[in-house]
Image (spheres, rainbow, N blue to C red):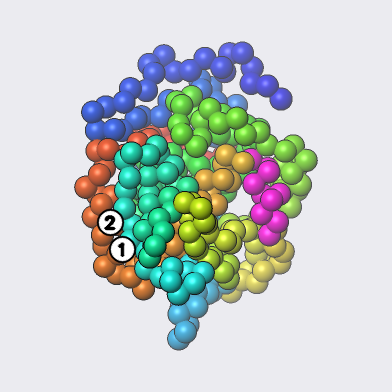
Amino acid sequence: MRWPLALVAVAAIAAMRSDAGETEVAFVRGAFESQGIEAVRRNRRYLTFEHRARRDAAGTPDLLSVETVRVVGGVIFVATARPGEAAFACPNPKLDFERPSGERLRLDFAGAAANAALYDWELLPLVDFVASGSDALFTYMGVHAQYHTAFVDNLAGFNLFLVDTFRSLAQPARAHRMVATPVPGYAGEAQEADRKATRRLRRWMRSSHLMFTDHGVDFVFRPAQGRLAIDGSPYWIALKSGGGAGRIDRRFDDPGAILAANPVVFGSAFRLAQHSALFRYLKADCPERWRALQNRVAAARDELDIYTIPVRRMPYAIRS
């Protein structure tokens, strides 16, 4: 289905890049209304949250605990990655500004270097998220959405809203096309959704309490011909709780079908899951390397391609 011609016109004032390397995202005019989305505007109370799942003695997170089930119906990442070989342990992270966004994060291994497929607009909030110690990135349990503070005013957070509300959007296969500003790895991308996969995922998502998660996923990283490879993918679970602890009712763990439903929207979600697991590994097992990454990202903020959205314009709810 094509956008009506009236919706194709972008905002009257195009987004301008400032000297700080920051671009305010412009949206296609009328796109929120067409998708059934209500923006935040002045409804900022309880817009942000943090949640860390309870751990057992071995450190295993419990996503089905009462505390988590009552708070998180959305996106929650808890996994920690591991190196594929002992020789790949504790790589040294660097930022390479000779390369474009999506290739700038480089990890130096013993005898090899690998560039990560993570865009600047994902890198900055993801480092802040992992540093916070939280697990939940986004939730929509009540009448409106809530974001982790790292994602409340940027394109990565906007995309998390689209992931969690995918079943309720009017045109989920074209959800990323609401963004009018050209963004590496997002707006203007040629990837198109597979309508059959989109319908299949939306039918599965009819359950009321869903989580997009990486719980139990074995993320394994290694250098591969100059690129960082991270095996493992997030997936969907449908929960039933009855007011107490939850239980998994169904799973949708076909990564190919999830990505095909909207390669741009879920592609970003997959990158966030895989690299948050990598960053947790660095934080837990290689603290000096992790601190170096934090410092490098903070110092390079002015050089990163950051795409921000004023909080008042972030997605707030799906109109009933």
Find residue 300 and report its horizontal and vertical position in percent: 25, 44
Residue 105, compared with residue 219, is above or below; it is above
Q: Write the residue at 42% across / 44% down.
A: 103
Which amino acid, mark 2? Gln
Q: Which residues are magenta?
A: 253-262
Q: Quadrant of residue 216?
A: bottom right
- Measured Cα–Cα span from mark 2 to mark 1: 6 Å
Residue 142, compared with residue 29, is above or below; it is below
| Chief SS of the magenta region | helix
Q: Label 2 belongs to which residue?
A: 294
Q: Callout 1: 10 Å neighbours few (<14), some, many (20+)?
A: many
Q: Are marks 2 and 1 in contact (CB under 8 Å)?
A: yes
Find residue 121 and report its horizontal and vertical position in percent: 39, 41
Residue 262, compared with residue 77, is above or below; it is above
Residue 214 appears left or right of 107: right
Find residue 180 and report its horizontal and vertical position in percent: 48, 24
Which amino acid, mark 1? Trp
Q: Quadrant of residue 2?
A: top right
Q: Write the residue at 38% across / 65% down.
A: 110
Find residue 142 and report its horizontal and vertical position in percent: 52, 52
Quadrant of the image containing the C terminus: top right
Say if the magenta span includes residue 260.
yes
Q: Write the residue at 69% across / 51% down.
A: 256
Q: Nearer the viewer, residue 315 or 44?
A: 315
Whether residue 215 is visible to the viewer of this picture, yes or no, is no
Q: Callout 2: 10 Å neighbours few (<14), some, many (20+)?
A: some
Disc number at residue 290?
Answer: 1
